[in-house]
Image (cartoon, rainbow, N blue to C red):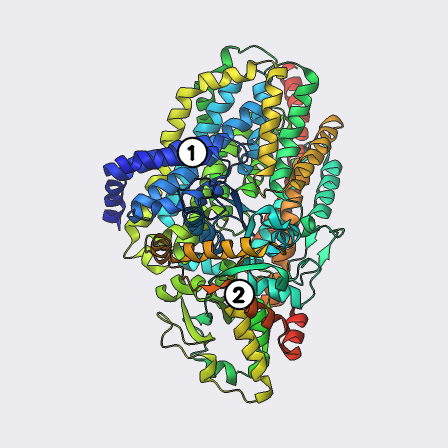
Amino acid sequence: MLEAFFSSLLQVLEPTTFLLALLGIALGFVVGILPGLGGAVTLALMLPFVYDMEPVQAFAFLLGMWVVTATTGDITSVLLGVPGEATSAAAVLDGYPLTKRGEAGRALGAVLFSSALGAVFGAFVLALSVPIVRPLVLASGPPHFFMLTLLGLTFVVTLSGGDVLKGFLMAAFGMLVSLVGIDPQAGVPRYTFDQLYLWDGIDLVPLVVGLFAGAEVLQLMLSKTSIAQSPPGKLSGIGVGVRDTLRHWGVVVRSSAIGAGIGIVPGMGGTVSQFIAYGVAQQTSKEPERFGKGSIEGVIAAGATNNAKDAGSLIPTVAFGLPAGAGTAVLLGAFLITGLNPGPEMLTTHVDVTFSMVWILVLSNLIAVAVAFLLLRHLVKLTFIRGTWLVPFLLVLLGIGAFTANNDFADIFVMLGAAVFGVIAIHWGWPRVPFLLAVVLGGLAERYLFLSYSLDGWSWLKDPAVIAFAVCMVAVVLWPPIRARRRRAAAARAPENDAVRGG
Amino acid sequence: MRRAVALGAVVVLLAGCGGQTTTTGGGQASGLKGETIDFVVPYEPGGGYDVYVRLLAPAVEKCTGATVVVRNEPGAGGLVATSKTFAAKPDELRLQIVNTVGAASSQIAKDEGARYKLERFGWLGRVSTEPNVLVVASNSRFKSFDDLLKSKSPVRFVATGPGSNEYINSSVLPKVYGFPSKVITGFAGSGEARAAVLAGKADAHILPLDSQLAAIESGDVRPLLVIGPKAGAPVADTPTTTDYPLKDTAQKPVIDALVALVATGRGVVAPPGVEPGRLATLRTALDCALKDPGVKQAAAKQKRSIVPLSGPETARAVSEVLRSPEAFQRLVRAGA
């Protein structure tokens, strides 16, 4: 197997294949930066071009493109406060405040470098999982996914910063919004007010774009200044961001693991994993109060999880032909076109193709990040342009971003509504992330709870993994007050010590 | 190398178009030359319906000289787009691929979201139809369809949601053959539903052959029954519903209605009231595109079958399905 691992690297580096990978990377680079046009859509558009390609070539091209969209999507999030991809929304939370402080270079350095590390970590997980992947996927089911959504919802409480009650209320409101639409089991429309648009519930893309980007652009319009409010200081360097990432390697590892783990779960995908990783980073940080105000750890968490998740979502796709999200669903088409059957043969006779995916994940991210570093100096200048010049351009991006997901004008209204809600939330200090996460997780929690019950009755409650999740949840709730008490105790002891020494 | 460069140029062009394919073809004189046709996919990019439309779009351009823009309008399992097409003006040049099975069952079930009457669309024709296949996990206790028939405990079927093709099949088939069953719904997609079968949490799954091919060929699932006429490889040796005579002959029209419904497959429609001359032109265009050797080749490459049926015949088949026996309609309504 080790031999196949290295021979697949040679296959990827074969000139035509490598050239196709570069082409995919270039394409993904642009698509990722532009909000709206997502990785999955672009993949679908490119599918007809792989008819005559060898399997490894086809995946070098498609996979190279797809994983890079997630990487460069973060650039737009950090610089303009507009998520380049729905999976890049968490990078806005701390990346944009850093940009406002004139530290865009540092934020970008951190988000891109952690992205590259996350990709390597994810690829490593994918490679290691090859021998055990089939039992692993079969052993996990709706009960585990349900507990995972509950764990995510528990983090909501910790994501609300100082005011747990406000976070809880926003999450409750998000849960209510997640109820809108056809219920997944019996097909009954809920809160749809006779509008067919509401049948699928509130779409996530316009919601994310409005809640984060729309709100920031509105504020920029009102302030009439440039995005960066202080001139680029000494600390604006990319190198600082890279060193920050290395210093917070624990955040990188944890966030990558979360990304890869959640990537496997169908339906959850990058939109959820980025916020869970962000929540965990805040939870474990020594300075949780700085999150949301420009914490470099928050940026690193968002970057690392973003690329590890792609490797995770490839695991069930390769092993069983079960796509975990829209992007892998399109990749499944590429399997059929190139005459491969996802399943056992991908782990035996065609294991070289599977390993080539690992290499493509790593190489395309490293290349994209290197290119991005070369261009960053110019990109950062954007943030010093006067707001009045930038806003019209940003408004167009917002409109496109909200519209292209479904080609439906109603999405623009959802985006505008979310933007207004976002501004109100920022103004009165109500946290937006718990709301968004509850919208995403509320629907999933309902679906997996019902599925768990109809598949197993209540016997799944005795599943050891389910119990382990429950223990984690209790720990998440209890840890912050315990930590606060220990800190208080330590603080109380410190003056005593001083007093002893002094006396 | 040159191919890669050319590909790059096209790729950049496409990226600039914001998710829409636009190319202009030379084409024959058809009265559509120079016009723009919206070809609507009622689902997200990447699915089977999307694949078919993206295959056909360039050929329709070649056949008509018009510009074809592929638009994805997902929502409510296709009901949003289909209802929009129904409300579109006849001269709008809006074509849509329809999941006829889903759309017809929603109409039969008098679904709130089904704001259309299928019989009033301008039917351009059918693109394909695939037989539905009942599969079980390869290590399942059910070795043949006979085992299902003899089962004392309910056979557990999986389905995404009420109204889906897989749901209707799995609720009608056991009733017709008289074996105990339960349909478990709520899966995010067919893939997740299949995972439950592979993990042994549920027993059986009924899906169109095309979406089962890879799993059958890889040996993950075993086909037990083809619903409808005899099919080709890899289910050439699998028995069909005709091989299993019904105990209750009164159920014969019901199973026939189910097979007829499935046979309506993937159709293409124009809004109601399209002027007859233009409808004829559009029908010719679809027919021409389906006969295009490039389309056939590309479809074969993607393992997608093309089984065309003319516009008038498709329209007739659809109205017959809508007039199916009351016993069948009752089962569909109970499912929705």
In this rendering, the label closer to the viewer, 1 or 2: 2
| Amino acid carrying mark 1 in the image | Leu
Q: Residue B108, located in which quarter of the rendered image? A: bottom right
Q: Chain of mark 1?
A: B
Task: Tell me: residue B252, above or below residue B186.
Answer: below
Task: Tell me: residue B122, above or below residue A74.
Answer: below
Task: Tell me: residue A67, above or below residue B80.
Answer: above
Q: Residue at x 70, y 19 (%)?
A: A222
Q: Which residue is mark 1?
A: B13
Task: Tell me: residue A300, above or below residue B302.
Answer: above
Q: Position of residue A237 (x, y in %)?
A: 46, 16
Q: Position of residue A108 (x, y in %)?
A: 49, 24
**N-terminal of the two: label 1 or label 2?**
1
Q: Chain of mark 2?
A: B
Count neighbours of disc 2 (C-alpha within 10 A) and say few if under 14, some if 14 to 19, many if 20 or more: some
Asked whether the viewer can see residue A469, the reply is yes
Q: Position of residue A304 (x, y in %)?
A: 48, 35
Q: Please give the label number shown on residue B110.
A: none
Quadrant occupied by the C terminus of chain A: top right
Q: From the viewer's perspective, is B79 left or right of A322? A: right
Q: From the viewer's perspective, is B318 left or right of A112? A: right
Q: Residue at x 59, y 11 (%)?
A: A230
| Amino acid carrying mark 2 in the image | Pro
Q: Which residue is mark 2?
A: B312
**Foreground residue, B33 or A376?**
B33
Asked whether the viewer can see residue B157, the reply is no
Q: Residue at x 38, y 58 (%)?
A: B291
Provide the secondary structure element on which disc 1 rests: helix
